[in-house]
Amino acid sequence: MTTLGVILGNRDFFPDVLVGEARRDLVKLFAELSIEPVWLSENETKLGAVETWSDAQKCGVLLRRNRERLDGILVCLPNFGDEKGVADSIRLADVRVPVLVQACPDDLDQFGLNRRRDAFCGKISVCNNLRQYGLKYSLTRDHTAALLSPRFREDLSRFLDVCKVVHGLSRVRIGAVGARPNAFNTTRFSEKLFEAAGISVSTIDLSEVFGSAAKINDEDGRVKQRVEQIRRYADAASVPNESMLRMAKFALVVDDWMQSLGISATAIQCWSSLQKNYGVNVCTIMSMMSEQMLPSACEVDIAGVVSMYALQLASGRPSALVDWNNNYGDDPEKCVLFHCGNWAKDFLPEVRIATAPILGTTLGEENTFGALEGRTDTGPLTFGRISTDDLTGKIRAYVGEGEFTADPLNTFGTRAVVQVDDLPSLMHVICQNGFEHHAAMNRSRSAAAVAEALSRYLGWDIHHHNRPAGLPPLAEY
């Protein structure tokens, strides 16, 4: 259930019936989208709308009283509305959440005094005042949009996803398990830039994890239960029992640590200390966490797991971290996504626990049991990457969409073939701006919501690859 503050704008020389009809339509729409509204009742102000300073005071108090529950605010203009009343209500609420401004359309055959709206004009005035007040807000694709139209329903649904991303990223706690692999400068990040954005990072050394795991008895009931969970999760027929026990104990230690600190996502040093000092890959454990909506990224890529989390918030589906790994023959708009094997099972209809052959060449393949092997089938793709740019003191990101394809691919690990329109220009953006070779992916169409949330409300520099025509621009003005 999503909770929205709702402000119904009104001007008294427009027909009252328009406000009543809008309230009726919103009740219907909210029920269909599982939205709980926080709005003035028809007993608190005329029609439950906001017009006067007194109305704005009442609305502001109501929203402020419920601000811990609010995911966003919807401004609905059944007619011209009162520009000051809307802006004053939000200012008095003192709540920092996304705001969507909607205006109802006039009908060509209803321009008489009994049905005239002028919301087309009123929306401009409301936005002008929001801008003067320093308030951030989103727009519908069409300047006016009927409340029960499919277009507005899509706009509102996307706005709800924006709210989830903004709300989730502004208070998430991330866990860094181990130091980044020394060979990977690419996973460096600025902890301070993330902290300033509300993203906190807690750390634990792998020696602490290994030490705690060593103290757990093989016959411990929690260990046996976790081993069975792993076996149910993926085909483990080829995995030695000792490797299963090590994975289970590692999972228990990390789980306990996450719960003690309220951590929602992790990035783990998946090589080479794990293989040298513990004797397994923990890709399966990371996959299981991501599948449970607790995303986990490779190679202590904190910015990578923040990217995973952003896509997950927008879509409600698990994310995975991938390498932009290989060209696909001579097709310029296709490429291969790959990682050793920690993708959530949401991406892998058929999956088995195996070894990591590439790591095995130097670390001993017998020390790499725990990697997953599977191929992603066809469907929608959203990809993205968040990166901290220490040289400019900014957080930057790119997002876009494509397709998982069924093109042949003969290799190991977790893998996919994807098609992205104008892929070469995307690679130019990535390389020329110094983005990492890691990206997050998600089986959804959520790039627009992520771009809106990161750009408009978090203030990050965003490149939206192949942004669809008709969406409001990312730049506010």
Image (cartoon, rainbow, N blue to C red):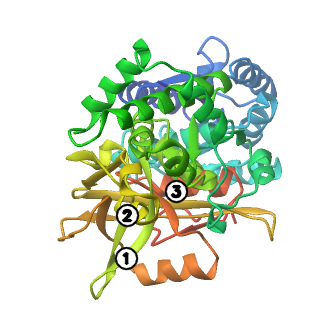
Mark 1–mark 3 distance (CA, rounded to whole Å): 43 Å
For the point 63% across and 41% down, which residue is it? 206
* Residue 469 visible (yes or no): no
Q: Quadrant of residue 210?
A: top right
Dot in front, 2 or 3: 2
Give the residue type at disc 1: Asn
Q: Label 2, on which residue?
A: 338
* Residue 409 visible (yes or no): yes
Give the residue type at disc 2: Phe
Using the image, tell me which numbered label, if any, was put on residue 143.
3
For the point 71% across and 31% down, which residue is it? 51
* Placement of 264 over or under 415, stated as above or below: above
Q: Are marks 2 and 3 in contact (CB under 8 Å)?
A: no
Q: Are marks 1 and 3 in contact (CB under 8 Å)?
A: no
Quarter holding the C terminus? bottom right
Q: Secondary structure at mark 1?
A: strand
N-terminal of the pair, mark 2 or mark 3, is 3
**Viewed as shown, does residue 226 lie left or right of 440?**
left
N-terminal of the pair, mark 2 or mark 1, is 1
N-terminal of the pair, mark 1 or mark 3, is 3
Give the residue type at disc 3: His
Q: Secondary structure at mark 2?
A: strand
Mark 2–mark 3 distance (CA, rounded to whole Å): 42 Å
Q: Label 1, on which residue?
A: 326
